Image (cartoon, rainbow, N blue to C red):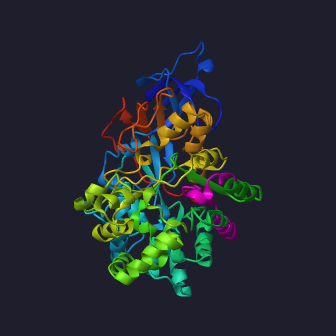
């Protein structure tokens, strides 16, 4: 007998087509048959070793988180309910140009320090890999959900060029090309950049184009966090569209938002730009999270000149009074490129986490609020945190616009991504709530998308971008990465006040045909593995 039959489910299959009632049979990790209600009339219904009564529940493909920062969390936390409980069955790691492969011993330590605010320093992790393939092999020992990997361009540049603001030599560019090719051959699905983060921001368009040519030759895609989401955002999007077209490389725009006051109501301009490119033959997708605030590190706001050389050089500049004053002026008056060309508004910067427990009293307060409590200027508070927490402080940046969020999520190229940072005392609730918020708030409550449309955005559309031939749809022969949820009750449990609350209305999640969520509880199953690039 087959392993499992899910009876009387309302199947929303990921294609965007209308839901239908069916029994779905699973065996050996795959969907082996789908018996629609009409077809079952008058014939014997399928049987299996186990049956689930799905009356009143929707069965859909597992959700694909196109922008995840779980690079160490998947290794550190086998439970990983932050994503599994949402119905996420695949995460895309290696985002924003900074992650942990490919590295050598020097670069690994530098990257660990640089993105402590995203993933922690990793004292509890055995970093027994250096190459992309070795990292994927480590994931294959068993993780909560599946994971794909983007080669981080900033890490590659740190490995070859270092953390300096200069043009790569021809020999260095050749080596970076080889590293990108090797990572793709070992299973990476594409290349990411963080063009407001050191050292990826120091790469010019010519360098990025050459790396993207390599990515295109392997059938991967380019995923940039581009050079501005504030002042100059539209120009930054246009730069990436032009660069990808020049390289002949598919483009996926990371957390494609239009933030800060200068961009209020301007989402239609971005979408028109993308529509023109799509109509001209460009291959473009994007991801967003369904919230208005962003999340990053406090150090990310610093101007690029202050970030040159890496974490130790940043701290040295901050401890020099004259240089620190120059940094303040760029942040508060000029508009730092790290803050997307917009003068920082300290009342919008909420401290979400610190690495030094002695600084925990500021968590949950804006920089301005924390400063007022101490009777100091906001810059004095920010400076104290940057130095005292050794650049590990994470923040929420309350600079988004709801009308932009809704407009972008309706677009035909849209997919879902949490951009979830799981560290800190008070992380952004998107890490725990993105996918049920789409289904509950934006589908059921607001009707911004139909249920069928939304599921397609979260499943088949990202699977197509990742070139996965057997995921993202409820189809016979496809992998049984599936979610059962109640469309009337599905909702995030995570809030800004309690950001680690688990969602409601998602009783069952299967990865490779095995229950990772059963009766609303996390099992001990570690069915996830690396999902590697499909060869051309």
Considering depth in this image, is 159 or 478 the residue closer to the camera? 159
The C terminus lies in which quarter of the figure?
bottom right
Query: Residue at the right extreme?
Result: 280
- Taking 451 as reference, is 112 above or below it? below
Considering depth in this image, is 298 or 513 the residue closer to the camera? 298
Using residue 148 as the reference point, say whether residue 134 is left or right of it.
Answer: left
Considering depth in this image, is 426 or 61 the residue closer to the camera? 426
Q: How many marks?
A: 0
| Res 475 quadrant in image | top right
Is residue 256 part of the magenta span, yes or no? yes
- Taking 499 as reference, is 129 above or below it? below
Which residue: 38% across, 77% down? 314
Query: Residue at the front extreme?
Result: 375
Is residue 454 part of the magenta span, yes or no? no
Q: Report the magenta residues as a range.
A: 239-268
Can residue 62 be seen in the rendering of this structure? no
Can residue 65 be seen in the rendering of this structure? yes
- Taking 439 as reference, is 90 above or below it? below
The N terminus lies in which quarter of the figure?
top left
Which residue: 41% across, 46% down? 429
Give percent across and percent down for residue 31.
51, 35
- Taking 111 as reference, is 442 above or below it? above
Which residue: 38% across, 60% down? 367
Give percent across and percent down for residue 340.
54, 66
Query: Residue at the top extreme?
Result: 42
| Res 351 quadrant in image | bottom left
Give percent across and percent down for residue 99.
42, 65
Give percent across and percent down for residue 101.
41, 67
């Amino acid at each position: 007998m087959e392993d499992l039959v899910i009876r009387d489910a309302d199947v929303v299959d990921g294609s965007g087509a209308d839901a239908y009632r069916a029994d779905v049979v699973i065996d050996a990790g795959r969907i082996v048959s789908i018996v629609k209600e009409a077809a079952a009339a008058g014939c014997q219904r399928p049987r299996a070793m186990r049956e689930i009564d799905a009356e009143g529940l929707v069965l859909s493909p597992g959700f694909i988180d196109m922008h995840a920062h779980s690079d160490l969390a998947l290794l550190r936390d086998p439970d990983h309910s932050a994503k599994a409980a949402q119905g996420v069955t695949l995460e895309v790691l290696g985002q924003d140009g900074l992650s942990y492969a490919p590295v050598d011993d020097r670069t690994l330590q530098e990257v660990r320090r640089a993105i402590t605010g995203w993933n922690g320093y990793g004292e509890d992790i055995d970093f027994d890999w250096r190459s992309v393939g070795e990292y994927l092999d480590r994931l294959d020992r068993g993780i909560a959900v599946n994971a794909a990997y983007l080669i981080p361009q900033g890490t590659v540049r740190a490995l070859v060029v270092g953390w300096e603001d200069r043009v790569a030599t021809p020999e260095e560019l050749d080596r970076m090309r080889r590293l990108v090719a090797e990572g793709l051959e070992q299973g990476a699905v594409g290349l990411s950049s963080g063009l407001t983060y050191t050292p990826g921001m120091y790469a010019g368009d010519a360098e990025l184009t050459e790396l993207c040519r390599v990515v295109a030759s392997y059938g991967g895609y380019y995923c940039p966090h581009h050079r501005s989401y504030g002042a100059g955002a539209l120009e930054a999007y246009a730069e990436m569209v032009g660069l990808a077209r020049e390289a002949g490389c598919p483009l996926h725009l990371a957390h494609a938002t239009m933030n800060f006051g200068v961009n209020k109501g301007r989402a239609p301009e971005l979408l028109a730009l993308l529509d023109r490119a799509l109509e001209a033959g460009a291959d473009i997708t994007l991801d967003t999270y369904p919230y208005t605030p962003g999340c990053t590190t406090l150090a990310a706001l610093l101007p690029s000149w202050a970030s040159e050389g890496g974490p130790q050089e940043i701290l040295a500049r901050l401890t020099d009074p004259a240089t620190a004053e120059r940094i303040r002026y760029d942040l508060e008056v000029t508009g730092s490129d790290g803050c997307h060309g917009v003068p920082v508004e300290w009342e919008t910067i909420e401290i979400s986490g610190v690495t030094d427990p002695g600084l925990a009293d500021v968590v949950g307060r804006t920089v301005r609020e924390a400063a007022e409590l101490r009777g100091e200027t906001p810059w004095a508070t920010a400076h104290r945190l940057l130095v005292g927490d050794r650049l590990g402080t994470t923040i929420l940046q309350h600079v988004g616009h709801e009308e932009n969020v809704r407009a972008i999520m309706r677009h035909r190229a849209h997919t879902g991504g949490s951009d979830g940072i799981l560290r800190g005392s008070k992380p952004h609730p998107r890490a725990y709530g993105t996918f049920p918020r789409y289904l509950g708030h934006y589908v059921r409550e607001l009707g911004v998308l139909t249920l069928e449309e939304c599921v397609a955005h979260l499943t088949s559309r990202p699977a197509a971008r990742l070139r996965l031939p057997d995921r993202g749809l409820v189809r016979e022969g496809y992998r049984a990465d599936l979610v059962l949820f109640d469309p009337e009750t599905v909702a995030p449990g995570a809030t800004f006040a309690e950001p680690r609350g688990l969602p409601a209305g998602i009783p069952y999640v299967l990865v490779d045909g095995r229950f990772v969520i059963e009766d609303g509880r996390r099992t001990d199953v570690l069915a996830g593995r690396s999902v590697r690039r499909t060869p051309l």
